[in-house]
Image: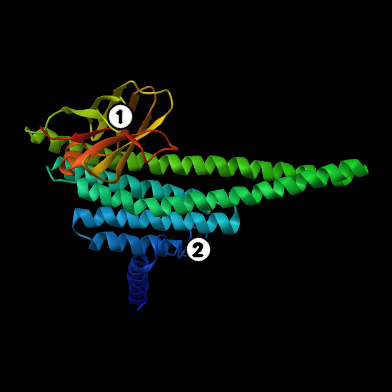
Amino acid sequence: MKNILILSIALAFFFGGFVSAKNQGDLPDAGLTPESPFYFLDKLGEALQEFFTLNPEGKAHLQITFAAERIAEIKVVLEAKGIEAKGLDIAQSRLQVHLAKAAAIVKKEKGKGKDVSTLAQELDEKLKAPKSLLLESFKEQKRELKEQEDQLKTQLKEAHLAGNVAQEEIVAAQLGQVKAQLELLELREEDIEDEIEAEEEKIEEEMEDEDEDSEDATEEKPESLTVTLSAQNNSGESGTATMKREGGKTKVKLDLAAAPSTPQPAHVHTGSCENLGGVKYPLTASVEGESETTLNVSFTQLLSELPLAINVHKSSEEVNVYVACGNIVDR
């Protein structure tokens, strides 16, 4: 009877946690936190979910879901009990484990010869919102502590002017505690952010490597190409734009003659110079005809998005006046 009861509780947490994670918004319900004596049930429920998830892609997604739940726990504990709560260490440690597991699954699947670019991108996108909400929570906590610090400084000054030594000592001690909490908060924020970004980079590396492998396998795609930039509206500015594959990204270098020292906005637009569309990728503004930008898109992907054109504007104030333009042609 006892075993049946325990199994029922575990299954309730398993299915309850699964539904919660599926139905919540950007950040799931924290549920039980590490501060609860029943937190072990949360671990048990997640272990069951992991056991019954059979395919690697599902397991990777599950780890990111768990990571989001740890982020929710950190947020709840931080807001309820402050930076010195013991539960923060537990939640942070488990967060790092989930992210490491997700990255390891992606790497393992890639090692089997599978295309993991889509999976890696999905995991990366799935983590962005919880991470952003957590950092916002840290900012709010710092804002509140800063307000306390300012209030205590005012009280300390008033006590000093009033010659109230006893009150001055009390306020000074409180001020020291607030400053210490602020320092701990900043250290914790930096530590968690570094851990998340480290695992994000591992996942993104697999995605970028996949892009690079894809480009290597497509022999007809060039390593680089040169776009001829012709003068527009009698500007007298003409030159070239060199586009070069650089890992999973694309480097764009502008070189214009007779260009002014005033910064001139430049973009990759959809369409052609004859029928220019909207901005697809912003480029670093040209200064004295020179500009260099690394676009966060692979060379192969960019070429698959043709027709595109590079357009240079007269200035930020006269952005509607075009001074140079060139169509990107896949030779």
Q: Residue at x 39, y 41 (%)?
A: 197
Q: Quadrant of the N terminus?
A: bottom left
The image quadrant that residue 79 belongs to is bottom right
Q: Residue furthest left?
A: 220
Tag in front: 2 or 1: 1
Label 1 crowd (10 A; few <14 / some 14-19 / many >=20): few
Q: Could you say which disc has been placed on residue 37 in the image?
A: 2
Does 153 sit above or below residue 243? below
Residue 179 makes an appearance in the image: yes
Q: Position of residue 54 (x, y in %)?
A: 19, 59
Q: Could you say which disc has been placed on residue 26 in the image?
A: none
Q: Position of residue 130 (x, y in %)?
A: 41, 54
Q: Position of residue 187 (x, y in %)?
A: 54, 39
> Toward the viewer: 9 or 141?
141
Q: Residue furthest bottom?
A: 1
Along the horizontal axis of the image, is 324 left or right of 329?
right
Marks 2/1: CA–CA distance: 76 Å
Q: Residue at x 27, y 42 (%)?
A: 269
Under circle 2, the secondary element is: loop
Q: Position of residue 111 (x, y in %)?
A: 16, 40
Q: Residue at x 41, y 41 (%)?
A: 195
> Toward the viewer: 229 or 170?
229
Earlier-in-chain disc, 2 versus 1: 2
Q: Quadrant of the C terminus?
A: top left
Please name the amino acid that badge 1 sits on. Asn
- Numbered-mark total: 2
Please name the amino acid that badge 2 sits on. Pro
Does 314 sit above or below residue 35? above
Residue 243 makes an appearance in the image: no
Here the colouring is: rainbow
Q: Could you say which disc has been placed on residue 234 in the image?
A: 1
